[in-house]
Image (cartoon, rainbow, N blue to C red):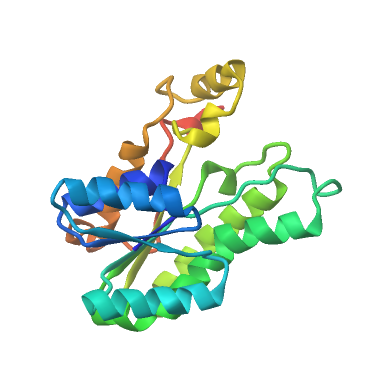
Amino acid sequence: MVTGGGSGIGAACARRLAAEGAAVVIADIDDAAGERVAAEIRARGQRARHVRSDVAVAADWRRLAEVVLGEYGRVDVLVSNAYALIVGAAHELAEDDWDRVVDVCLKATYLGVRALHAPLLAARGSVVAVSSVHGRTGAPGFTAYAAAKGGLEALVRQLAVEYGPHLRVNAVTPGPIATPQWGRTPEQSRRAEAARTVLGRFGEPEEVAAAVAFLASPEAGFITGAALPVDGGWSIRS
């Protein structure tokens, strides 16, 4: 299952996991986007479907669990990728906006594991949460987003301890990735952000998906509670 799988990193993860043989369920609030990615995957002869879901809502997770278990009988991997970003300093940010960002970026992973923990444990499966470099660094206006992503990495460590050895839980921490969100940013800002990386460029969603697929796979069988940077060196540059 891939949340926020209708675009960007989530869509790349859905395509990569399907290419590696998984039957992928895309959970996204955007019906058109989710259906489009699922159709692309099916056109390649692989298995995918979309289920409209708001990952911040517990009832939607219960319905997702029913759909997945009813159709496939198991869940091996949960990629918790959906996000919300509303920028504002603490004194400017509306409480509803804070709640929405934290609910989608942090609470959704808790809800997903709560809804799917039994089949994930039975499959000796894997959870991979998509965090961000903003979970470890400060930037003006990222009040709720940074708090949520920092909390997400703490939650990943806690879940790894809670459910090991039967379930591995890890995170990836992307830096600037060429997703639609960045397409709405002025060119000057994009150039400046790329220059902050050691590699001097934006990453591609497929590069994050490769890291997610690795952490979800048996090849990462001795890795749990980790947060893998996929940021082109953004977080190590002074």
| Residue under the image location 49 percent in, 51 percent down | 131
Left or right: 86 in relation to 133: right
Quarter of the rendering occupied by the N terminus: bottom left
* Front residue of this view, candidates 128 and 13: 13
* Front residue of this view, candidates 2 and 199: 2
* Front residue of this view, candidates 230 and 26: 26
* Image position, residue 43 (x, y; %): 19, 47
Q: From the viewer's perspective, is residue 173 above or below residue 119?
A: above
* Image position, residue 55 (x, y; %): 51, 65
| Residue under the image location 45 percent in, 46 percent down | 173
* Image position, residue 198 (x, y; %): 44, 24
Quarter of the rendering occupied by the C terminus: top right
Left or right: 189 in relation to 183: right
Q: How many marks?
A: 0
Q: Is residue 120 visible?
A: yes
Q: From the viewer's perspective, is residue 227 above or below residue 112?
A: above
Can you name the residue that lies furthest to the right here? 91
| Residue under the image location 44 percent in, 31 percent down | 178
* Image position, residue 12 (x, y; %): 33, 44
Q: Is residue 172 visible?
A: no
